[in-house]
Structures are given as C-alpha cells and as structure tokens.
Image (cartoon, rainbow, N blue to C red):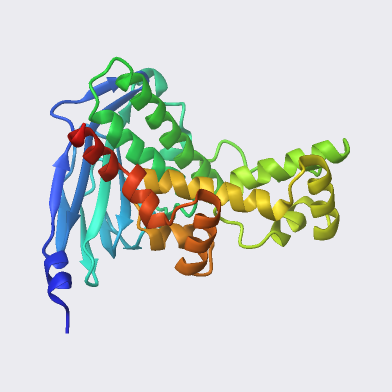
Amino acid sequence: MPSRRDAQAAHFRFDKKYLDRPLTLGRFVLDQLRDCCFPGELRGEKEKASPYRLLYVLSGEGTLEIGEQRLAMKERTFALGGPKEDWRIRSEGQEPVRLLVASFRLAPEAKHAYPELADWSAEPAGRDDAGNLEACLLELLEEAGREDRYARESSEACLNRLTVFLCRYRQASGGRRSAQPPQPAKAVPEGGKADLVYETVRYIDRHLVQIRELGEIADALGYSYSRLSHVFRLEMGVSLQTYWNRKRIMRAMTLLQAGETTITRIAETLQYQSVHSFSKAFKKTAGLAPTEYKELYGRAGEDRQVVQS
C-alpha cells in the first residue's frame, strides 16, 4: 500500500515557463524554457515559431508521443521534436516526471550550420548517460533567471554547446545527414611515458562517468593494466586508483553543490557499487559525509547562510 509520502509525491506538480518573449542570442533565438514536474499526463501544442523543441526527462519515467512516434522515456533520455508536431507524455510509476523543454530556432545566417538537426524525426529517444546535456540545460535555466550583463553571453554559450551535443549525437548514431562519419579513437601516442599519462588523464576527463573499473582505461589505450598503472605512478606521484577516486569525488562535489540530483543517483552515475561505498569514499576524501556536504554547500545551504547573514 502506498505511503502517505508517496501519495503526496504523486500529486506534486509545477510548470515554470522562464520567458515572456523570445530571446535573441547570437545565432540562436530561444523561444521558451519550460521546467515542469507532473503526475499523470502533460501535453504540448504545436509551436509555429520554434523549429526545434528539446524534451529532456530529468527524473521519473513515462511514454512520450510526439508526431507519429511513441517513445519510452526515463531519467536522462531526450527527444527532439519539430514545429508541426503535437506531443504528450504520460508518467508511469509512483514518481512524477520532471521534464525540461527548450524551444529554440536558428538565426537565418546559421540555418545551414547544423545539418544533423534537419532530419531528426526518425530518431529514437536519445541517451545522456554522462549527464552533459543535463548539465547544459540546468545551466541554461540558471542563466535565464539572471539579469546581469553576462547572462546573454552565457546563455548563448549554453545553447551552442547544446546544439553541438545534439549534432555529435546524431553523427554517432549514423544519421543520414551527418556531415562526416564518427571519427575513430586516436591512436595511442608514441612519445613516451609523459604522453601515455596525458592520454590517460584525458581519457578519464572524457569518460569519467562511464568507467566501471580501471582495466577499461588500459584496454582503451592498448596497454596492460600493470604497465599503465606503473607508468602513471612514476610520472604523477600517485596511483591511478587514487587519481580516479579523487576525480570521481570532485565530480560528486559539483553535483551535490548543484542540488539537482539525489545522493543515490550520484553514486550510480559515478559507478559506485552501492551508496554505502560511495559515502565511505566521499568522507575519506572530503572529510564529510555526502549528506553533510550537501547540507553545507548545496543550494539550500547557501540560501540559509544568506538569510542568517
């Protein structure tokens, strides 16, 4: 039987629209940003102005009907709709769906800059496993609420990153209109130990949330793990395991400060086997448990500090 708390969650909803008029941002026009959380069903109507509407599920799961497609959506999945397509999404399960919708278009001089977006209608729901698109959208929401002199420049940069992400995703999925096929991974450098360590560090930068164990790095770079870990320690002065652990904890700190993701989800995203193992590793490095860190340095904690001061 659902608890009282579950019943309250099932009725929780909000629907925030950020813009009261289109916002011109360099080569983009941002028509609307919408952040909504809902049980049941949410509908969106055709929008004549916006050729592109990005729908991104932050949490929950459901079924999206857009145009003639019917897509299964869950956390960190997205779809791109066109201007002549109605859409609706129905939540499934007890947790409400939180959905971000970005409606945008290209300025006339930039319409041919992103050919990968021109034929997205046949594309299935996309996956954002690394959370890059999520981070970009949340940053765009943050900038849309600012009124300082840099908000427009930062919003334009967010939209540019968002569009490039979609184009690269389209290329990697083998879209017909890809400007060029996905490029193969770079060959392992032959410039000695320093170059190997640099490639290792860059691989961790790019694939931090996908790495489940360190042997994957050695396999990707074409070396044995024993060889790679030995060279890494010699050049960096710390073990590869220690470096990887620190990078994961630093990413966890960033996510906890943003306050948009649960501790359980952070542990899963960073490939920890359990919340307990994540909490233990986090406290060893940060000196605080994740809950304590979030309380002190998350957005809610910052708001309390401002009020108290």
Image location (x, y in percent) of residue 279: 47, 61
| Residue at 32% across, 53% down | 58
Q: Is residue 206 visible?
A: yes
User: In the rendered image, which quarter is residue 219 located in?
Assistant: bottom right
**Camera-nearest residue between 62 and 231:** 231
**Camera-nearest residue between 76 and 123:** 76
Image location (x, y in percent) of residue 124: 41, 57
Image location (x, y in percent) of residue 91: 22, 65
Q: Is residue 149 above or below residue 143?
A: above
User: In the rendered image, which quarter is residue 265 located in?
Assistant: bottom left
| Residue at 36% across, 50% down | 294
| Residue at 14% across, 47% down | 15
| Residue at 36% across, 43% down | 297
Q: Is residue 159 above or below residue 250?
A: above
Q: Is residue 6 above or below residue 58?
A: below
In the rendered image, the quadrant that contains the C terminus is: top left
Image location (x, y in percent) of residue 117: 42, 39
Q: Residue furthest bottom?
A: 1
Left or right of 121 in this view: 161? right
Left or right of 270 in this view: 74? left
Q: Is residue 154 above or below residue 280?
A: above
